[in-house]
Image (cartoon, grey):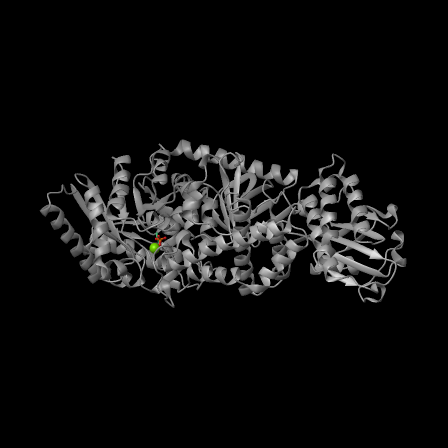
Amino acid sequence: MRSALGGPRLLLRRLREVMADPVSAQVRLDKIVVHIASNMVAEVCSVYVLRDDSRLELFATEGLNREAVHLTTMRSGEGLVGRIAETAEALALSDAQSHPAFSYKPETGEEIYQSFLGVPILRGGSTLGVLVVQNKARRTYSEEEVEALETTAMVLAEMVATGELQSIARPGAEIANRRHMSLHGIAVADGVGLGHVVLHEPRVTIKQLIAEDPAREEARLDAALESVRHNIDLLVDRGNAAGAGEHREVLETFRMFAHDRGWLRRLREAIGSGLTAEAAVERVQNDARAKLARRTDPYLRERLHDLDDLANRLLHELTGESFVVSHEQMPDNAIIVARAMGPAALLDYDRKKLRGLVLEDGGASSHVAIVARAIGIPMVGDVTNVTDLVETGDAIIIDGSTGDVELRPQPDVQSAYAEKARLRARRQEQYHKLRDVPCVTKDGVKIGLHMNAGLLIDLPHVAETRAQSIGLFRTELQFMVAAQFPRGEQQYQLYKSVMDALPDTPVTFRTLDIGGDKILPYMSRLEEDNPALGWRAIRIGLDRPGLLRTQLRAMLRAGAGRDLRIMFPMVATASEIDAAKDLTMREIMHLTRHGYELPRDLKLGIMIEVPSVLFALDEILPRVDFVSVGSNDLTQYLFAADRDNKRVATRFDPLSPSMLRALKTITDKAAVHGTSVTLCGEMGGKPLDALALIGIGYRNLSMSPASLGPVKAMLLALDAGEAQAFIADKLAGTSGADSIREDLRSFAEAKGVPL
Ligand code: PEP
Ligand code: MG
């Protein structure tokens, strides 16, 4: 069997020589088709390349009329060649003309050829073109010949992918894989980023396609498989505490694939055809991708991702290439493209070189999104298939405020975005100038602007923006970016570092708000049918007092001799406040007993984000020093609409009369009880929503650093009294409108308030 396969190996060796020749792309391609035709004993060999107008263009031929090169084209789906491109599957026919899809181009002179064998030229799950051999006589192409041609097509895929063929394409017709593409995802973190693609966990570039010694390649494959399997077993055995955020289910799937007989057989066959072990993995994976990528079943697509990851692991094992891009390889304007990414991985990149992040999976509330916002890079999430569509080094532009991604942009698109980025920078400069202007509305109402934070990397923003305080410090972020559960001492170190870094800025530390959408990779996950309504935040803290007391102790120690503010999330009843205060008192007693210095002043508060609190304000407000409204969760619970479910997350507008009335109840009651109130949800950071909040009595807003400038610019131009009258009128009405957003926008426009 092996000796019969000397043919393909010889061909691959020839092709390697041709690839190394210092000749033009056309000459190279012309030589390649001659070699293939002769090696496969075919009269014709032709290469068709897919253009960005979805037509396949004849780029080279041995056997057909040479004049047809760069002239003959066909639609994807048209004729046999078009069908191969469309289905991404090989087609072998002994009597091509009797096939229903057969159509013929007179200028090529192909009517005299009876047999036809065509294979797709594939890369990363997309079809780049079609490679065809034809014979005059009727003949049946063997399975080995089909595979040999598929292997040969990999060489051509490399040529197309490098962009080498673009120079010989007909003027005006770009080849498909270099074409400009506009993609769309979810706007996650604001900003415009222009740069070049860096693939996180990059695909391995295979330098050696053709094997010198097949037996050695088999041995290399076995060793690599053994090592990958071993690593997976280790991860599975570590059980739920699996490293790197990988869940057991994914690992089990990996393990299943790693032992899959069919997969292993295909790998060995590919090596048998003359490929190196790494080229064999790529080859088999290309086929799997082409077959599965066209399936719409989400389960199968998910399996494809798993299989891709496994193949990628195997390739890294075989080539010894590192999984992460080295600092030297990072361009100065890197836009990271990944299927999914954890927050810690993003922090590993050199921040000075990061210009943006694009993910296939990962929306606005993913943990990596929090980090992207904190370090101020734009991010777009949920971009279908993006890792398959890009090549490392491709030019790319992302707009984190619209969710648009422009891949390989044309010069006009590029300059339009460059202008947008310049405009943003100019606006940023103007906001910057406003930072020392006191935040007072036109009619003299003082508004407190505060900042949300959660990591040390957030802190420099306080000085940049002159935020009055940190109105919300999300302590769970430390837990979410860590590889293991942070111990009390580590918690203490973080809180102390924050207070040391900001000696004159009050910080409101919120106790752990985990559960629901906030999952810790190293903690076993409770299977709950409704996690948003489940065991989370203060509920965990009260049921596992050891956890909450450790954190309270860390906060109290960090606040020694200073003013300390602690806030409890997700409180639903007055008794929960009593219980939380009780735990705090016990910690204070414990620290006193052990001679620790206590905070100079301690203020305790709660988040208002569960609707039950709205109807217990008279009991709740007297129990606390302050409250902060979590409008993100309050909106989700008030409308019974999951904040992370794309279908419903934006269905209801927080600027609806019902939500605004609910919010107004809080400020009204807080005024009666003399309790200080802040709002720290996303609403506060949007100028129009903030305008509404001022109109219903809010005087303190806490938001992400990037929002402080735009909100302040709005406030300086606003007459709070006018806003109040306008909204009171709207809320008194009974129009039944779902939202007052448009009315409010017109109001702002008429009054010259910038939004
Ligand atoms: C909120 O719910 O509005 C809030 C500020 O808390 P988080 O977004 O962290 O749940
Ligand atoms: Mg919340």
Residue 702 is situated, as x and y percent measured from the top left of the image, at 34, 45
The residue closer to the viewer here, 63 or 553, is 63
Q: Look at the image and tell me whether residue 166 can be seen.
A: no
The quadrant where residue 583 appears: bottom left
Residue 295 falls left or right of residue 497: right
The residue closer to the viewer here, 237 or 360, is 237
The quarter of the image that holds ligand 2 is: bottom left
745 shown above or below 306:
above
The residue closer to the viewer here, 426 or 385, is 385
Residue 259 falls left or right of residue 595: right
Residue 362 falls left or right of residue 284: left
286 shown above or below 162:
below
- Identify the residue at image location x=86%, y=55%: 105
Q: Quadrant of the N terminus?
A: bottom right
- Identify the residue at image location x=60%, y=46%: 390
How many marks can you see? 0
Q: Look at the image and tell me whether residue 153 can be seen.
A: yes
The residue closer to the viewer here, 61 or 67, is 61
Residue 403 is situated, as x and y percent measured from the top left of the image, at 53, 49
Residue 248 is situated, as x and y percent measured from the top left of the image, at 42, 60
Residue 671 is situated, as x and y percent measured from the top left of the image, at 24, 52
- Identify the residue at image location x=68%, y=54%: 273
